[in-house]
Amino acid sequence: MPKYIIEREIPGAGALTPHDLQAISQKSCGVLSNMGPRIQWLESYVTDDKVYCIYIAPDEAAVRAHAEQGEFPANRISRIKTVIDPTTAE
């Protein structure tokens, strides 16, 4: 199943409280539960003004549907073609 990285522009994201992040996570998980097991949220990275989320999904349309249902921004969705890390150099 393809993986996607979603860039979400959220001004002040880095200042969100643990309670804010919990509420956002709960909302996302609720939407995912309603959508079924074919779309999965793996993890997210929070920066000052953006959140980058990694999802497994059948297609970009499923990622967009999740964003729309959860009322989350999805400013850019990119399919991950491959993953490299330091072991790639070996």
Image (spheres, rainbow, N blue to C red):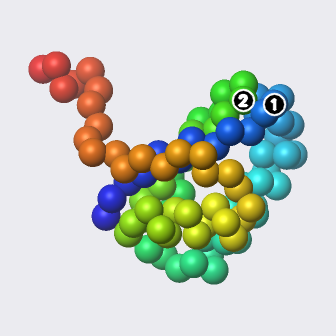
Q: Check the picture and name the quadrant holding the N terminus.
A: bottom left
Contact between labelled residues 2 and 1, with CB atoms less than 8 Å apart: yes
Q: Residues within 10 Å of mark 2 (few under 14, many from 20)?
A: few
Residue 34, compared with residue 73, is above or below; it is below
Q: Is residue 37 left or right of residue 70?
A: left
Q: Amino acid at mark 2?
A: Asp
Q: Amino acid at mark 1?
A: Gly
Residue 48, position as x, y percentages in the image: 72, 25
- The answer to which quarter of the image holds residue 81 is top left
State whether residue 7 appears in this view: yes
Residue 19, compared with residue 36, is above or below; it is above
> Distance between the Cα atoms at labels 1 and 2?
5 Å
Residue at 27 percent across and 31 percent down: it is: 84
> Counting residues from the N terminus, which is met first, the one under dot 1 or under dot 2?
1
Q: Is residue 5 left or right of residue 11?
A: left
Q: Is residue 19 left or right of residue 5?
A: right
Q: Which residue is mark 2?
A: 49
State whether residue 54 appears in this view: no
Residue 12, position as x, y percentages in the image: 81, 30
Q: Is residue 70 left or right of residue 66?
A: right
Residue at 49 percent across and 69 percent down: it is: 62
Q: Residues within 10 Å of mark 1 (few under 14, many from 20)?
A: few
Residue 9, compared with residue 71, is above or below; it is above
Q: Nearer the viewer, residue 57 or 59?
A: 59
Q: Which residue is mark 1?
A: 12
